[in-house]
């Protein structure tokens, strides 16, 4: 069925990255265990290469545009000319955050600032940690995000040099959100960056972390990020991932979350940018009593492709996961929702709910939704649902019959489609920002100035 | 105010209205009664501008303007309001947001500024009280999870806030218990004024005990076969539609 060239392109691209690794291995550096890790990762990558549409999980995503590249290591980009003023669109208005900025994958101290943090909280760049305290990383890096089965994680593991390291000690509450802002900026050269983040929450701690990935049109960049998160016993994490890359960019993000007993995680992932973007979230309940809210909004338009992969693994009993993904697709865009929930044999008293709803605003848009539940325990409450539809003509007429013009009526109904997800964002300035982002992407979205 | 002449309407290729003539003056309340399938709802919907209804002949002028040529939103802005038989549920859009958006769209059309936030709250509270709606209702999704009665109250509530010149009430009484019916009727009666006209479409005479019409029309098989005063509605309630069918010769009666 698939053209053979697809495979040939994938093979060529693989060889390019493998050769790139061989020539830059020394430069990539790191302590011995990291160098070994890189070698294992590239070997693994070399053996299975890039996925093609023959792979079940990649069935609906054509990687050819990414693989044709070629992307140069970000270090070759001109020294960054990113000014502090240019960051403003990506911040959250009045919200006071600890802001840690990365440009093309490298920590940018002059754009970053930390507010007063509780004692023991550490926010560092991964590069600095690799130099000064690699042992603190060894227990975690690549222990949660496995490169055994994921080409992009393998590439990231082979090439990563920097990223964010966050450690919250036990019994500590960080009130002000930590905003990790990853900027892709390369005017002339297509570049690739592999940021690597590690977020560790000690027992009974609490934090809010925002990861923004952003860039500017018409830059062609490739971000291949990996974030490993460990949430200690009874700890509470609120996590936001906002993908606002250039609409010609490629974005691959993989997040893994390990939840220990009684921990609580709310993770929102919002995709707006990228010509091709894949957002993967994998979580695992290691101990009983955990809860997870996993929400997502994706809004591709024109020829954008947004691919979402989620995996929730109920290993321990008595955990609850509620997953809510909404897609709004316009133009000739493509979307994928691939949701996987596993309820293992011992995970009794599991509650797992998964919903994916998609709204097609144009006849040429296409979405593939594959919800999945695999249940091996017998005393559980699980369900999943998936819908694909258009705006309801009766609802449009109802609004128009009250004096609201057709365009505004359509926009109101489109916004309403994701309102239940947005309303779950507890931090008001983040919610307002998301509202603005969503409204700005509606067809001729002006005129819906306030929260519905 | 409303002048309908020889109106013919098709729905999915089938002729439903077969030549309606109707003239409504400011201050009047007209009732349209008729058996199921006679075309009552089609008449209401076509006045509101539903596109699935195809006008094949005739005219409808509202204050001298060609109503049928206007977009639904412009009809509303000109002062036509239809209370839906089946109001749509729209989760994610609050009643407050919706009503404010509607009110401001109408104001803008007439060159007025957007309503002041506090004025809006006061306006809404006054009208909500009239219909026995509590305050939390404004924050809820539009008709989301509303009972049949609540939805109908919400229609009349919207009408009270938007203050249209001409109101079409499509089966607003159906599915209401007696308490809700009284509240809805009070809401409608509070709107009666020498400057405003109403067209009350109903299957039963019940609502007309409370909202007493000036003129009653009987619609049968797409045509108005009899018109009269409020007594006509009472006779229909007592004797059914049968006697009218015998009295008024009409094409449908001739069919086997």
Image: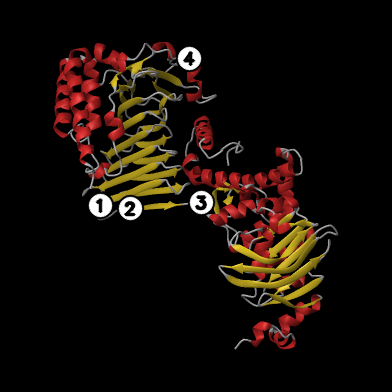
User: What whole-number distance in Å separates the C-alpha atoms at marks 1 and 4?
Assistant: 50 Å
Marked residue nearer the N-terminal end (1 or 4): 4
- Tag on residue A168? none
Return the residue at label 4: A84
Return the residue at label 3: A391
Return the residue at label 1: A375
**Mark 2 secondary-structure assignment:** strand
Nearer to us of marks 3 and 1 is: 3
- x 30%, y 14%: residue: A75
> In this rendering, is residue A198 above or below A415?
above
Q: Position of residue A77 (x, y in %)?
A: 34, 15
Return the residue at label 2: A382
Which chain letter goes with mark 4? Answer: A
Q: Say which of A5 and A311 sits in front.
A: A5
**Mark 1 secondary-structure assignment:** strand
User: What whole-number distance in Å separates the C-alpha atoms at marks 3 and 2?
Assistant: 29 Å
Marked residue nearer the N-terminal end (3 or 1): 1
């Amino acid at each position: 069925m698939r053209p053979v060239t697809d495979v040939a392109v994938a093979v060529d691209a693989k060889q390019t990255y493998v050769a790139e690794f061989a020539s830059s291995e020394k430069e990539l550096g790191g302590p011995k265990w990291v160098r070994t890790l890189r070698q294992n990762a590239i070997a693994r990558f070399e053996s299975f290469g890039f996925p093609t549409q023959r792979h079940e999980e990649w069935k609906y995503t054509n990687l050819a545009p990414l693989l044709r590249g070629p992307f140069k290591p970000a270090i070759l980009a001109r020294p960054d000319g990113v000014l502090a003023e240019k960051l403003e669109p990506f911040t959250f208005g009045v919200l006071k955050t600890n802001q840690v900025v990365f440009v093309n994958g490298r920590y940018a101290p002059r754009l970053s600032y930390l507010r007063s943090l509780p004692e023991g909280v550490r926010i560092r760049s991964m590069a600095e940690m690799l130099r000064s305290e690699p042992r603190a990383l060894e227990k975690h890096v690549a222990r949660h995000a496995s490169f055994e089965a994921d080409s992009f994680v393998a590439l990231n593991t082979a090439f990563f040099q920097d990223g964010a390291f966050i450690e919250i000690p036990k019994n500590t509450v960080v009130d002000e959100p930590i905003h990790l802002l990853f900027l892709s900026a390369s005017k002339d050269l297509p570049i690739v960056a592999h940021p690597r983040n590690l977020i560790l929450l000690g027992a009974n701690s609490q934090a809010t972390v925002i990861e923004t990935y952003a860039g500017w049109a018409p830059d062609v960049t490739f971000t291949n990020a990996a974030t490993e998160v460990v949430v200690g016993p009874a700890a509470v994490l609120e996590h936001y991932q906002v993908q606002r890359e250039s609409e010609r960019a490629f974005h691959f993000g993989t997040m893994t979350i390990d939840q220990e007993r009684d921990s609580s995680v709310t993770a929102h992932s919002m995709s707006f940018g990228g010509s091709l973007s894949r957002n993967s979230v994998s979580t695992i309940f290691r101990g009983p009593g955990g809860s997870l809210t996993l929400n997502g909004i994706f809004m591709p338009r024109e020829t954008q492709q947004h691919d979402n992969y989620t995996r929730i693994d109920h290993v321990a009993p008595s955990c609850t996961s509620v997953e809510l993904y909404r897609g709004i697709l316009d133009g000739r865009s493509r979307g994928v929702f691939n949701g996987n929930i596993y309820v293992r044999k011992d995970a009794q008293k599991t509650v797992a709910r998964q919903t994916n709803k998609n709204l097609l605003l144009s006849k040429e848009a296409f979405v593939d939704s594959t919800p999945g539940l695999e249940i091996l325990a017998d005393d559980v409450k699980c369900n999943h649902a998936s819908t694909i539809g258009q705006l309801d003509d009766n609802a449009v007429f109802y609004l128009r019959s009250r004096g609201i013009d057709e365009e505004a009526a359509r926009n109101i109904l489109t916004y309403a489609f994701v309102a239940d997800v947005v309303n779950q964002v507890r931090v008001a300035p983040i919610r307002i920002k998301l509202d603005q982002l969503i409204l700005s992407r509606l067809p001729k979205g002006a005129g819906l100035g306030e929260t519905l | 105010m409303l002048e309908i002449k020889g109106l013919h309407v098709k729905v999915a290729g089938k002729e439903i209205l077969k030549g309606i003539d109707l003239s409504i003056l400011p201050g009047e309340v007209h009732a349209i009664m008729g058996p199921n399938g006679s075309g009552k709802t089609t008449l209401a919907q076509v006045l509101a501008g539903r596109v699935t209804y195809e006008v094949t002949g005739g005219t409808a002028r509202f204050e001298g303007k060609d109503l049928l040529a206007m977009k639904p939103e412009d009809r509303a802005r000109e002062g036509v309001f239809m209370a839906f038989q089946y109001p749509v549920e729209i989760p994610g859009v609050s009643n407050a947001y919706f009503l404010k958006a509607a009110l401001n769209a109408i104001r803008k059309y007439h060159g007025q500024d957007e309503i002041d936030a506090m004025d809006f709250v006061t306006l809404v509270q006054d009208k909500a009280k009239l219909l026995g709606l509590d305050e939390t209702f404004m924050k809820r999704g539009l008709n989301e999870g509303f009972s049949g009665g609540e939805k109908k109250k919400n229609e009349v509530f919207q009408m009270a806030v938007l203050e249209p010149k001409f109101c079409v009430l499509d089966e607003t009484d159906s599915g209401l218990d007696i308490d809700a019916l009284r509240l809805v009727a009070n809401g409608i009666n509070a709107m009666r004024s020498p400057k405003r006209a109403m067209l009350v479409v109903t299957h039963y005479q019940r609502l007309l005990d409370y909202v007493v019409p000036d003129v009653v029309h009987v619609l049968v098989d797409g045509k108005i076969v009899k018109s009269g005063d409020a007594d006509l509605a009472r006779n229909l309630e007592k004797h059914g539609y049968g006697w009218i069918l015998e009295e008024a010769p009409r094409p449908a009666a001739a069919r086997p």
